[in-house]
Amino acid sequence: MSTVSAILKDKGEGVVAIEPGASVLDAARRMNEHKIGCLVVTQNASVIGILTERDILTRLVAGEKDASRTRVADIMTKDVLCCAPDTPLLSLRGLMQRSRIRHVPVQEQGRLRGLVSIGDLNAFEADGLNVRIHVLEEYICRG
Ligand code: AMP
């Protein structure tokens, strides 16, 4: 059974973060710059929130707030669901489905080790299935 560490091995541990006092405009620009849909909010190296494009849509745009005057802390989600490097991928998928989230930071002993998105999980599992199909095709064709 593969775990989150297998995805981090391919993807690396880099996490794009932002400070709670930054404006949502800066957060959106940072997301665009990195072509991502989520920022982890950190203060003194601790994870204190998460901000995704969904938050910008539902809490800023639909709330008719000004992106340059609204702080990340005002619209971020504070109770962050995290996983560990040894979390099985099946459990991670279950967490994402149950909680209707697409991004999960990876923490180990209080240290941020990476972030896994639903896209990372799907790509990793699709690669594994392709390898398995290839092996089975080889086996059938040889037989
Ligand atoms: P997403 O589908 O990841 O864009 O997120 C949908 C909603 O869930 C947004 O309000 C996010 O702030 C929140 N969210 C996303 N990831 C997490 C997480 N790991 N823990 C807690 N909330 C999250």
Image (cartoon, rainbow, N blue to C red):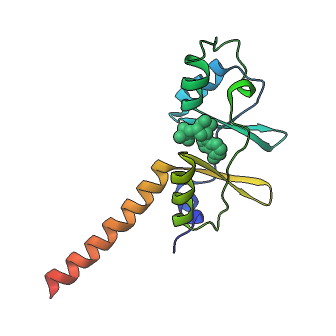
Along the line of sight, the residue nearer the viewer: 63 or 30? 63
Q: Quadrant of the C terminus?
A: bottom left
Residue at screen point 58% across, 63% down = 4
Residue at screen point 63% across, 18% down = 25
Q: Is 63 displayed left or right of 130 in the figure?
A: right
Percent x, y for residue 130? Answer: 31, 65
Q: Can the viewer see residue 15?
A: no
Q: Is 53 displayed left or right of 72 in the figure?
A: left
Along the line of sight, the residue nearer the viewer: 105 or 76? 76
Percent x, y for residue 22? Answer: 73, 23
In terms of image quarters, where does ligand 1 lie?
top right
Along the line of sight, the residue nearer the viewer: 59 or 17? 59
Q: Can the viewer see residue 127?
A: yes
Residue at screen point 50% across, 33% down = 35
User: Is residue 30 placed above or below 40 in the rendered structure?
Assistant: above
Quarter where residue 47 is shown: top right
Q: Give the residue at the far bottom of this rendering.
A: 143
Q: Give the residue at the far front of this rendering.
A: 98
User: Is residue 91 placed above or below 58 in the rendered structure?
Assistant: below
Residue at screen point 54% across, 33% down = 34
Quarter where residue 63 is shown: top right
Give the number of marks: 0
Quarter where residue 41 is shown: top right
Percent x, y for residue 12? Answer: 59, 54
